[in-house]
Image: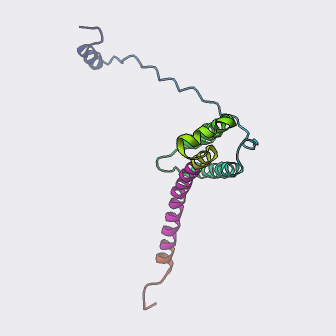
């Protein structure tokens, strides 16, 4: 039987010997943010406006998430969306040589700029959902507080 077999471990546990500690798993290396100029002239005007709105909303969500968490979404997800997913999406659009963007239309029936803006709309929809979830908590708290005030400070005794 091996030195660290089941019976050996049980005997050590009974004798009060502690098992050798397992070293913690190292944290994954931090991924540096993708630096990107969203005012690049190669980005369509409509996409620039959507990017600006997304960035403003992400900033707002980040601040809201300081107070509370959104179900199924974390500040790490928000950071990844802002620092990785959004810039990589827009960069991948401008990296397509303009002469080859028509290939996207041939494959999808939609222009590259349409596909970009549609993807930005999908990101915005997710951000809007997160904002609604965060706001719902505040709405519920306000409703509970107004109900309490009404019950606490409204006289329900008809003889008063």
Residue 157 within the segment the image draws in magenta? no
Q: Nearer the viewer, residue 106 or 110?
A: 106
Q: Is 91 situated above or below 63?
A: above
Q: Bounds of the magenta span?
A: 121-147
Q: Nearer the viewer, residue 154 or 5?
A: 5
Could you tell whether 26 is left or right of 159 in the image? right
Write down the quadrant of residue 36 in the picture. Answer: top right
Q: Residue at x 56, y 55 (%)?
A: 128
Q: Is 11 situated above or below 111?
A: above
Q: Nearer the viewer, residue 95 or 68?
A: 95
Q: Residue at x 26, y 13 (%)?
A: 5
Position in image of residue 2 (x %, y %): 27, 8
Position in image of residue 116 (x %, y %): 61, 45
Q: Residue at x 70, y 48 (%)?
A: 48
Q: Can the viewer see residue 128?
A: yes
Q: Can the viewer see residue 80?
A: no
Could you tell whether 138 is left or right of 15 in the image? right
Position in image of residue 146 (x %, y %): 52, 72
Which residue of the protein is positioned furthest toward the bottom in this rendering?
159
């Amino acid at each position: 039987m091996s030195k660290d077999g089941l019976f050996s471990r049980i005997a050590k546990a009974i004798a009060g010997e502690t098992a050798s500690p397992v070293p913690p798993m190292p944290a994954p290396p931090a991924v540096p943010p993708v630096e990107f100029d969203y005012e690049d002239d190669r980005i369509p005007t409509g996409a620039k406006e959507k990017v600006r709105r997304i960035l403003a909303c992400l900033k707002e969500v980040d601040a809201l998430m300081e107070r509370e968490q959104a179900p199924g979404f974390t500040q790490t997800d928000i950071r990844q969306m802002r620092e990785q997913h959004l810039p990589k999406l827009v960069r991948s659009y401008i990296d397509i040589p303009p002469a080859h963007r028509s290939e996207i239309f041939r494959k999808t029936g939609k222009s590259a700029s349409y596909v970009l803006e549609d993807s930005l709309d999908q990101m915005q929809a997710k951000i809007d959902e997160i904002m609604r979830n965060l706001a719902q908590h505040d709405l519920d708290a306000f409703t509970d507080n107004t109900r309490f005030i009404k019950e606490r400070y409204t006289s329900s005794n008809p003889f008063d």
